[in-house]
Every structure is written in structure tokens, then in C-alpha cells.
Image (cartoon, grey):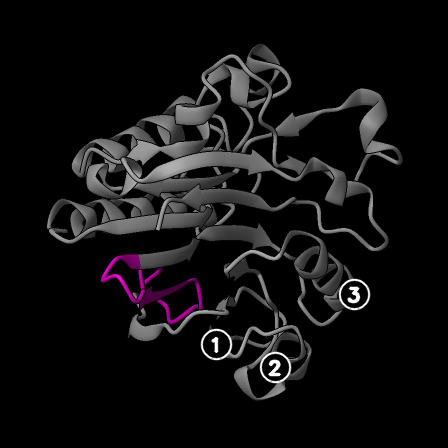
Amino acid sequence: MKIVSWNINSVRFRIAIVEQFLREVAPDILCLQETKVVDEDFPHEAFHALGYVHTVIHGQRMHHGVAILSRVPIVADDRFDWQANREARHIGVRLPNGVRLENVYVPAGGDVPDRAVNAKFGQKLDFLERMTRWSADLAVPTILTGDFNIAPLPSDVWSHKALLKTVSHTPIEVEALDRLQASNDWVDLGRHFHPAPARLHTWWSYRSPDWTKNDRGRRLDHMWASRDVAAQAVAHSVHEDCRSWLKPSDHVPIMTEFAW
């Protein structure tokens, strides 16, 4: 089974590259973040035409939004408000084998890494703390994936030294993500299959006219699994070529394959 996570940055605006990816890669399950569409306007028809007839969505107009599209049956399981303000940032399902699949879009956190002057940064840290409390009580096989908006390792960014004070790579965010990972002994599948310092970037800013020239990427998108599920993972890949497609997202898809 192939499971993909992709921050698509507006599913309707980028539906053409979503369809292209699904035709070329044919994952079994696609987890999207930042869909930016209310549920009644979600483009179900495009997914149904390609065989993704099982859909669970949690939308919001113009902002946020998450969705899980599947070729295999899935059962809606949960929607957690880890942001504590009803933003559509999480959706979870149960797979046919009983594994839970949790799709999350962690807040970006604004530009200043100081909660005293930047409320968004404080909200991001609080979001991660609520996730950590949930994770600590988890006792079922689970995959946790999505846009975590944190690049934890020095090799997860184009320059560790240059980005130490940049939101997404600050020590306080990395420590918060480390606590989340330790809370349930999560396996980071990206680094399990591609140990640091291997290149594994998943995001490049739109600010650069040619992202390939300076290649200032960060690994913001992750696929984690509980130990029992991680033991069944056989491969992990990052589809970097999607960043050069027409009307690209600033993120690219990540995919883990499981021996199910």
C-alpha cells in the first residue's frame, strides 16, 4: 500500500497537477493539507474519475483544510481541534487493517520566533503541545503524517546556521517536535529510509524565481508511524520533480510504501 502526503496549497487551483500525480504514481491513499475549500465545493468528481471514491474531508473557506482520498475503504474516525479555534487542520481515518491514519496541518507560526510578540508562534507551540498529550495516550497502530511546518535536523534545511532564528527551524520548535516524537516513540519514516545527512527537502519558497538555482529547501513534510506499523514500511520517497510542474505547490508529495 502506498500512502502519500502533500500540502497542495489549494486543491481546486492545482487540481491538474493532482490528477497528473495520481495518474503517474497511483498511490492507494492521498492525504492533502491546505485544501482551501469548504466541503460542499470540494472537487470530488476529479478524484472519483481516477478511482479515489472513498473521501473524508474537513474544509475551510480560503484557509487550511485537510482531506484523505482513497482507493481502498476508509472509515472516518476523528477530527481534533489542536488549534483550539476550530480551524480545519486535522482529520483521521481507520484503514481496513485497523491502522489509524492521522493527517495534520501544523500552523506555520508567523515570522518572529517569540510568542511574546507573535501570537501565531505561541499558537504553533500550543498546537504541538496538544498533539503531544494526545500522542502520549495513543495505544493503537497509527500513521501520523502531514505538513508539520518544522524541519528538525540540521540536514533538513539548506543552511542550519542561516536558519537557526527562522521559524520552522528554531531550537524551541525542534524541541517541541522532539517531545512529540518521544511521546509515543514515533519512527520518522523519511529519516528511517534516508538517514541524515541525506538530502530530503520537501518545500521551496515561491520567493525564488528559480527554486533549482539556489535550492534553498526545507523538510517540512513528514510521515511518522508507531513502531508496529513502521516495521511494515518498505520504502519512502520524495517527489521533488513536482515542484517544477505547472502551477506547483511550494511543497512536494512524500510517499511511504507498506507491505500490506
Q: Is the residue 48 above or below the residue 234 in the image?
A: below
Q: The magenta stretch spans which residues? A: 81-100
Amino acid on which the number 3 mark rests in the picture: Ala
Callout 2 touching callout 1 (CB < 8 Å): yes
Please give the residue where the numbered disc 1 appears in the rendered image: 55
Q: Position of residue 140 (x, y in %)?
A: 15, 53
Image quadrant where residue 116 sits: top left
Is mark 3 in CB contact (under 8 Å) with mark 2? no
Q: Is residue 142 left or right of residue 238?
A: left
The amino acid pointed to by label 2 is His
In the picture as drawn, the residue positioned furthest to the bottom comes out as 40
> Which residue is at 32% across, 70% downward?
79
On screen, residue 258 above or below 64: above
Front residue (pair 237, 177): 237
Residue 73 left/right relative to 209:
left
Most extreme residue toward the front is 260
Q: Residue furthest right?
A: 209
Q: Which of the two labelled residues, at mark 2 and mark 1, occupies the earlier sequence position? A: 2
Residue 120 location (% of width, % of height) = 46, 49
Q: Which residue is mark 2?
A: 44
Identify which amino acid the numbered label 1 is placed on: Thr
Q: Distance of mark 2 from mark 1, alpha carbons?
A: 8 Å
Does residue 202 lie above or below 6 as drawn?
above
Q: Is residue 93 visible?
A: yes
Q: Residue at x 60, y 20 (%)?
A: 199
CB atoms at circles 1 and 3 under 8 Å apart? no
Q: In the rendered image, which residue does mark 3 sit on?
A: 16
- Magenta-colored stretch includes residue 72: no
Report x, y in % for residue 158: 64, 19
- As drawn, is 208 to the left or to the right of 183? right
